[in-house]
Amino acid sequence: MYIKKLTGNSGCDILLLENNKYTFVRKISSSIVYNQRLQSQVEKQINFSKLSGEILTPKVYDEGINSSGLYYFDMEYVHGNIFSDYIRHNDINTIMPIYKKILKFLDMKTVGKFDATKKITEKLDSLPNIDKDTRNIILNTSWAHTPTSFCHGDLTFENMIVSNGNLYLIDFLDSFISTGLIDMAKLIFDIRYFWSHRNHNKKYQTIIRNMFFEKNIRSLPDYIEHENKINCLVIMCILRIMPYIPEDNITLKKYLHGCLKDATKDKK
C-alpha cells in the first residue's frame, strides 16, 4: 500500500510503502538507461552490509523490473534524522560517537594502489564547460598510487541517517574510480561549503562542528598522503553537480560557482 513519496536528489522515484509484514522504501530507476547504474548501486549497498563495522545500511528485501521496464528495489525503512539535521540539533558531545564511526570508516585499509590518470581524464572529458585552468589543476596532479578501497560514492551528510544511536548509509553511488578518497572529498566538500545545509539559513550553527570534523579528517593518514588528489576531487565534486542544476535555479548556480572559485583559488 502506498503511503507517500519521499524526497531525493538522484532523479529516481522513492516511495514509502507497506505490506502486511513491514513498512519499506521502494526506489525506482529514473529511466531504462539508468537501470544498470541503479543495479550497481544496490550491489554496492548489499556488499557494504556484509562488511564488519559499526555503520549500517538498510536491508535490501527485493528487486525487479516493473511494467514500464524500470528496475526497482525494496529496502528497509529506517526512521531517523539525516545527519545534517542531527548536527544542527545536537551538541558536540552527542554528535561525537557518530563522528568517530565516520572517521573509522574513512580510515579503512586499502587493498591496493593504481594509476587513476586515465579514469580522471575520461571523467573530465565527460563534463561540460570546464575551463582550461581548472582542467589543468586536476591533470597536473599526480594520480599515480591512488589507493583502491571500498567507496560509498556520495558520502554526504544527507546520505547518512542517525536512528537510535546507529548510523546508516543510504544512496550509494557507482563511482568512476573505486577509492575511499572520493568519500573523503565528498565529505570535505560538504563540510567546507555546507552543501547539506544549503537550504537552511542558520549555517553558522554548524561552523565550529564542521571545522572540528574537518580537522580530524585532515589528520587521517590517507588525507595526509593524498591531500592534493583529495582537493582535486573536491573540485570535481562541484563540477559534477553543476550540470544537474536547473537553469532557473540562479541562486544555487551562483552558490556552486562561488564554491568552485574558492576550491581553485591559489591553484591556477
Image (cartoon, helix red, strand yellow):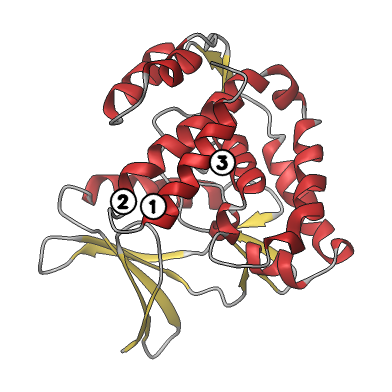
Count residues near mark 2 (Cα–Cα under 10 Å), then give few for <14, some for 14-19, many for 20+: many
Circle 3: residue type: Lys
User: Which SS class for mark 3?
Assistant: helix
- Tell me where residue 265 appears, x and y as whole percent: 59, 25
Identified at 34% across, 44% down, the residue is 40
Discs 2, 1 touching: Cβ within 8 Å: yes
Q: Name which of mark 3 and mark 2 comes first in the sequence.
A: 2
Label 3: few (<14), some or many (≥20) within 10 Å? many
For marks 2 and 1, give the CA distance: 6 Å
Circle 3 sits on which residue? 186
Question: Which residue does the numbered mark 2 point to in the structure image?
Answer: 38
Q: What residue type is labelled 2?
A: Leu
In the drawing, what numbered circle is on residue 92? Answer: none
- Separation of marks 1 and 3 at Cα, in angstroms: 20 Å
Give x and y (percent) for residue 62: 34, 66
Judging by the rendered image, the residue that carries numbered circle 1 is 42
Which residue shows up at 23% across the image and 62% down it? 64
For label 1, the SS is helix
Q: Nearer the viewer, mark 3 or mark 2?
A: 3
Mark closest to the chain's N terminus, 1 or 3: 1
Q: Residue at x 39, y 38 (%)?
A: 240
Quarter of the image for residue 51 reads: top right
**Residue occupying the far left of the picture:** 68
Q: Which of 244 and 36 is in front in this view?
A: 244
Q: In which quarter of the image is the N terminus?
A: bottom left
Mark 1 against mark 3, which lies toward the viewer? 3
Q: Is 93 on the left-hand or right-hand side of 31? A: right
Label 2: which secondary element: helix
